[in-house]
Amino acid sequence: MGDNCFNGIFMPTGFSPNGDGLNDLLGPKVGRDVKKFTWYLYDRWGNRMVMSSDVAFKWDGRFNGVLINTGVYAYMIDVEFIDGRKETLSGNVTVTR
C-alpha cells in the first residue's frame, strides 16, 4: 500500500491547521509493509471526528465545516501488515495554531 522506504505506520504527534503551508494537514505516514489500515480521530468526549482508510487522505482540521479548537485529540489506527500481523495503535495529536 505505502510506497515509502520505511516499514510500519506513524502518526504525527501534532499539526497546525492555520493556513501557513506548514503542517496544515494530518494523516498517518504509511510504510511499505502495510497492507491496509483505518485511522480514527476523537475529541475529548469520545466523538469520532475522522475515519479514513485512504493513504492519500489528509485531514484539514475541520469538523462539520468548522476549524476545530486547539487542544489534544486521541487517535487509533487499526493496521494489517502484509505478513498478516494486525495491530491497533493509539496516541494523541496536539492541535496548535
Image: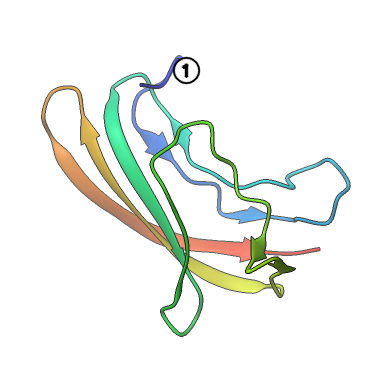
Q: Residue furthest bottom?
A: 45
Q: Is residue 84 left or right of residue 53?
A: left
Question: Which residue is painted at 46% across and 32% down in the image?
Answer: 55
Residue pointed to by mark 1? 4
Report whether 13 appears left or right of 53. right
In the rendered view of the protein, which quadrant contains the N terminus?
top left
What residue lies at 20% left-to-right and 46% top-to-bottom? 87
Q: Position of residue 71 (x, y in %)?
A: 65, 74
Q: Residue at x 59, y 42 (%)?
A: 58
**Secondary element at tag 1:** loop
Vertical side of 42 occupied by 81: above or below: above
The picture places residue 67, in percent across and down from the top left corner, at 74, 67
How far across and how far down the image is residue 52, in percent?
43, 47
| Residue in the picture at 38% in, 36% down | 9
Amino acid type shown at disc 1? Asn
Residue closer to the observer: 63 or 69: 63
**70 left or right of 42 in image:** right
Q: What color scheme is it?
A: rainbow
In the displayed structure, 30 sits above or below 96; it is above
Q: Specify the quadrant of the image occupied by residue 14.
A: bottom right
Q: Quadrant of the C terminus?
A: bottom right
Kindly indicate the quadrant of the structure image that contains residue 62. bottom right
Residue placed furthest toward the left? 84
- Give the answer, above or below, for where 79 lies relative to 43: above
